[in-house]
Structure formats: C-alpha cells, structure tokens
Amino acid sequence: MKKKKWITDVISKEEVEKWKPGNVVLISAPMGAGKSYFCKNPLYDIANEKNGRILMLIHRSNCVDQFKYELETAKKTDVIDVVTYQSLEYGKLHNLKNQINLSLYHYIISDEFHYFFNDSSFNNKTAVSFQMIMSNTSAVRIFMSATGEYMARYIRKYLKEHGRKKAIEYKVPFDFSFMEDLIFFHKDASMEELLKDGIEKGGKGIFFIQSAEKAYKLYSKYKKHCVFNCSANNKRYYEYVDKEKIKNILINERFEEQFLITTSCFDAGINIIDRDVKHIVIDIVDIGSLIQCIGRKRIQDENDKIHVYIKVINNQKLAGLKRSMEQKVEMADYYRKSGYSMEKLMEKYPMQNDPNNILYDDLVYDEEGNVIPNSYTKVINEQMYFKRKEDIADYALMLEKYGKFGYCKYLAIKFGFWDEETGNYMYGTLMEDHELEDYLEKMVTDDTVMLQLRDRNELIKKIDAKQNGRLLRKAATLNQILEERELDYRIKEFETTRWYTDTKGQKKKKKYKSAWKVVRF
C-alpha cells in the first residue's frame, strides 16, 4: 500500500486563503481521506479568524446526527452549522419564514455532492438545492465527494454555459490496494451462503443490499448474529430497525454483532473502524453508491484488508437497464432537439406528462422576475437528465467495449484488478449453481430432447433467469446467461421429427421445428 495522502496534504491553509467569495471548489478524494477533518479543523480555524460561518450540507439524516455529535464534542458548533440538503429544498419550495439564509455563510460545503445526481432517481428536488447554492455568490462553494466525477463534469458544464469562472479543483489519489480480492457472484442465495460461512469460520462483515425486503429477509433468518438497518422512510421495514443500536454504531463507529445488514441508507457519511470487519458484500446497482459502500470500512494501515463480494449485473440486465434509461429520457431528448418547443412536444406526446419527472411544469417570469399570470412552460430537470445520460453511456461502455462479463471487467479496472501489460483480469467468481450444473450434466448424459414448450419448463425454472420479475424463456437469452455464469453448457435448438401412433393405431410422423437439447460446450 502506498503512503496515504490526505486532503490537508493537497490543500494547505495558504491555498484556502486564496479562495474568494463566489469561487467554486471541487474536491475529489477517496473515502477516509480526511474530508471531515479538513472542515472541522483547518477550514474552521480560517473561518473563525475571519468571524465567518460554515454551512455543512449533508444528504443523510443519520450522517447529520453523527457530524453534529462530533462538532459538539469538539466544541465547533459556534462556527459550523449542519443541515440536510432536503431541509434546504423544503424551505425554499414552501417559502418558509425560517428557511436557511445562505448569505450568512462564508463557506458552503456540499458534502458527498454526488447527492445531486444519485438521489435524483427518487428525489426530483435535488435541482432546487443545487440552484440555491450556485445562485449564491457571496460564499465560497465547496463540493466534496469520492464519487462526484459525473456531477463535477456537470458543474464544469454549468459554469461554462453561465459564463462563470472555472472551478478550482483538487484531487487526492485513489488507492484500492486495501482490497484483498474482488469476487463476483450471480445468485441471491450466495449472500446467505457467505453469511453462513462467516458464522462458521468467524470474522465480521457488512452486507449492503439495495432491496430493504431482501435485506430484512436475510437478517430475519440469522437475527442472533446480525443487526439490521434501512431508511426511516421505509414504512414497511423500518419498524424492525433497532434505533438504539444504529445510534451506537454512528457514535462508536463499530457494531458489536457479527454482521451488519443494511440498505444503501448507509452508503455514505458513516465510518466503521474495526479491524475484525473483513468482508463487504454488495448487491447495489449504482456504481457510485457501490464504491461508497466499500469506503464505509475505514482502513487503519497496510495490514487492514477486506474481501469484497459484488453481485454481477449480467449483459442481459445491462441491456435492459440501458433501454430503461433511454426510455426515461425520451421526452426530454425530444424537447431539447425540438428547440424547447412546447407545441412540438405536445404534438409528439398528446395529453401526456413525463412519468419520470425529468420534464416538469414551471411558472414563466418576466424580465423583472415577476410571474406572468396563466403562463407556464416545460423545464428539464438537468441533474436527473444528465445523470441518466451518464448511466446510458456507462452501460453502453460495459456492453460494447468490454463485451462478455462487461460489468465485472469495468469494476476490475476501476479497482485495480487488471494487468494493463497482459490484459488479464484478476477478479474471482464464486462457485455457484452446483445443483443446476448437476441437472444440466444429467440432461447431456441422458440425451434429453425437449420437443414442446411444456417440456422446457423445468429447465427454464432451474436456470431461473429473470427480467422485471419474469422468467426469461428464449434459448439465445438463456445461453447468454449460462455463458455469463461460466457454465459449460448450452441449449441447442434444432428441427427434428418423431413417429407416433394415433388413436386408430396408425403410425404417423410429426415435425418439431424448434426442439431443444442441452449440450456440453
């Protein structure tokens, strides 16, 4: 492991003092590089000397509680205020009398500023807080994240289009050498197998699972060994969260149970400092959130390593995700290409609203900023739109540049499990599908032929490949799934005939145009 670099190694006190009101500062730094330390110490000291104040914007309420606790302990609340982005948005949209006044602050810090993009998939108000921050030119606007690459690109574009000064940018090098290995798995059942294996062999681990239902079901089987967490907004499963235990995790930066099973509500802003945590298992689609999850374990030194297990998104699902994203931006794409013509938009999509909220209705203002009565226009939520376009580009890259196992190769390169000289990938895959493999081998040995649709049902159910909750049934699709699971079997589709005896005892020949059989590949 290389010698670790901290934000304070890259941004000195003298550097900070060069910043002027209205500047935009972009800080790209890996998890655990001292973003909080920088805000609570050097920046605090400088603001205090100037009788200035700092506003810290955080995207998760549990992270706010943790940071407030740290500030109170360090006696830094006289200069630093901490609020959520969502409270900023709510105050603005509802015109609250006590809404936060950004002009009171010398520094406005957007912590984990990938929030503007990542949360836009379920919160279409992220553009509100972004516009409020960018409209304030009396403060230095600081944007910090380990996974803010796409949002940083958007901010550069925004500044250029609005004739503003370029951002001041700082980068702390990323180093994933703390990852002992990178292992992929395909099936949900493998998460349970990993947990059972951990119980048997010892060692602590964290499971990040996108679905609260899936996370809770795993937890409910092994409650004695686990602690469960999900978002407070999840009305169905939050009642099973032990709030006191979660509070202690935030304060003590460790959990006492063997496993923490959580949704992505813990994907950023919390620290787990515990050498016994050796395993991180991730079933989350968004790449930025996935990287944030890995960073929750704070590495202490070169001997503090982790094993990372990630659920594969196969090429079939990648193509589905890409199509889904393309459909979501379809109306906004047309609106842009039509020169923002509402007439052309209504001609193309009569009596339709954008179900994805990328396009929304807004008031029309005159040159003096007054609302023009009975007038409205369509506006593109730029953060939502730009994020989805970036996702489309990523999925296309995985499919077109990397081809087979594109998702695995993409992440292997990102995390350093790729030899540039030889082109070899150094990730592993869990041994799965033993039952399916035995079943396929038996079909080969028995030379089983599936003549009709009903004959294939058992095979289709055994492969258990789904899209949007429905079993996939086409031979070409199932072969792709078998290939991506690295199983050396394929379905051969062919034409054949069979003789049969009819009810009158006469022999007849019947043609089957698309019979199936399993062959060893």
Image (cartoon, helix red, strand yellow):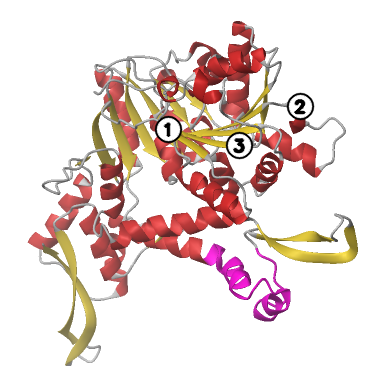
- Amino acid type at mark 1: Cys
| Residue 241 point in image, percent of width and height | 57, 25
Residue 102 as seen in the image, left or right of residue 412: right
Instruction: Residue 146: say if magenta.
Output: no
Label 3 to label 2: alpha-carbon separation: 16 Å
Residue 159 place in picture, x, y as percent = 59, 49
Q: Quadrant of residue 136?
A: top right
Residue 233 rendering spot, x and y as whole percentages: 64, 36
Asked if the magenta segment contains residue 337, the reply would be yes
The answer to whether residue 488 is visible is: yes
Q: Nearer the viewer, mark 1 or mark 2?
A: 2
Please identify the residue farthest to the left as the structure is shown.
Answer: 445
Tag 1 secondary structure = helix
Residue assigned mark 2 = 104
Which residue is painted at 41% across and 15% down in the image? 273
Q: Can you tell which of label 3 and label 2 is closer to the viewer?
A: 3
Q: In the drawing, what numbered circle is on residue 293?
A: 1
* 26 up-or-down from 448: above or below: above
Q: Amino acid at mark 2?
A: Leu
Q: Which mark is residue 23?
A: 3
The crowd level at tag 2 (other Cα within 10 Å; few <14, some 14-19, many 20+) is: some
Q: Which residues are magenta?
A: 327-354
Which amino acid type is marked by label 3?
A: Asn
